[in-house]
Amino acid sequence: MQIREEKGKILILDDEAPVCRTLSRIVNKIGRECVTANSAEEAKELLKEESFDLILSDIRLPGESGLDFIRNTVAQDPDLAVIMITGVDDPEVVEEALELGVYGYIVKPFKVSEVLINISSALRRGQLEAEKKAYQNTLEQTVAERTQKLREALTGIIQVVARTVEARDPYTAGHQQRVAELAAAIARMMGLSEESIEGVTMAGTIHDLGKIAIPSEILSKPTRLSEIEFELIKSHPQVGYDILSGIEFPWQVARMVLQHHEKLNGSGYPNGCSGEEILLESRILTVADVVEAMASHRPYRAALGIETALEEITKNKGLLYDSQIVEACLELFAQGGFQWAASD
Ligand SMILES: [Fe+2]
């Protein structure tokens, strides 16, 4: 009989020395090493010292029974196969052994061929399961690596799109990136998950995507906008949403972009949503957007500075801006733990 070569040893557990000798001879005959134990206690000591592929176990033993030994010590180890070799020919005991997941059940007196066949199929099954596990691990690793690469590609594409929008409006170059950075820092301060922070960062990076539909003369106009021009500017969250809603993101990026100019009391645009109708991520983007915009230079005014920006969100805390988010933002700057990495 041809049995595939394996490295692990076989443990023989039987209190009768002649049975141990016979089984050892059979195991050696198929080119496998074995170790014998006369009691469950001895077998437990051996298991602490080395690993085995298979256990051939008697049921009636001095002290702990073979079944209890399997139940208490071996059944939890999926890599260890067990064959019961016993004088107990009782269907109830067989059923109990099967429930414990044993690979085979041989009644003494046994035939050599019977033992060989059982050992062979148990080892083959064990090997197939080990191969299946290794394949699953490789598969999971491959999926994780590909997902990571796709996310990196998505981030790269989003950044290119962001720069394309900003290229038409040099005065706000870098604005989206800086809003994304501040929004992520606020989200982290609030204890949001890394997954949510990634979503906020992505939405922040392209939150003004809809400005692509607005003439660049209006975007960079150094004087006050007319009512019509302002109405046109106000269409950008909806345009951004319309572009992004066709893309399957792992987050609600399109909705986050749609709501980034909504205000807590319903006075924002485009839909006048209020309170929790506005996504938490959008409420964070709103605060980050206002703070970044006021802290930076604009075509129609010089930079107002971070102090003025923080005064604005403090003044309107709970009215226009979510209180918890404002608190987190203030805390962030008070701690001196935030600085924009992106420069314009
Ligand atoms: Fe905007």
Image (cartoon, helix red, strand yellow):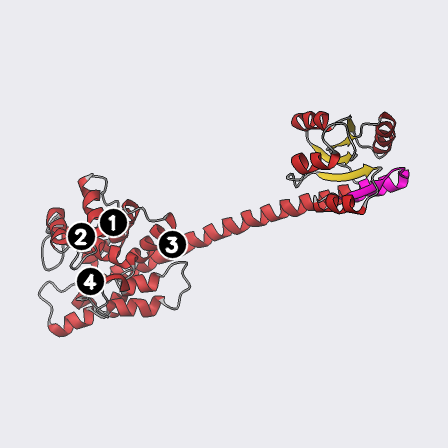
Q: Nearer the viewer, mark 2 or mark 3?
A: 2
Mark before the other along the chain sequence, 3 or 1: 3
Residue 30 drawn at (x, y percent):
84, 35
The Cα–Cα distance between marks 4 and 1, rounded to whole angstroms, is: 18 Å
Callout 2 touching callout 3 (CB < 8 Å): no
237 left or right of 137 in image: left
281 left or right of 89 in image: left
Q: Which of marks 4 and 1 is in front?
A: 4
Do we see residue 209 in this rendering? no
Residue 62 falls in image quadrant = top right
Residue 264 falls in image quadrant = bottom left
Residue 58 drawn at (x, y percent):
79, 34
Residue 243 falls in image quadrant = bottom left
Residue 43 drawn at (x, y percent):
72, 28
Callout 2 touching callout 4 (CB < 8 Å): no
Q: What residue type is labelled 4?
A: Lys
Mark before the other along the chain sequence, 2 or 4: 4
Residue identified by numbered label 3 = 155
- Quadrant for ligand 1 reads bottom left
Q: Which amino acid does label 1 sit on?
A: Leu
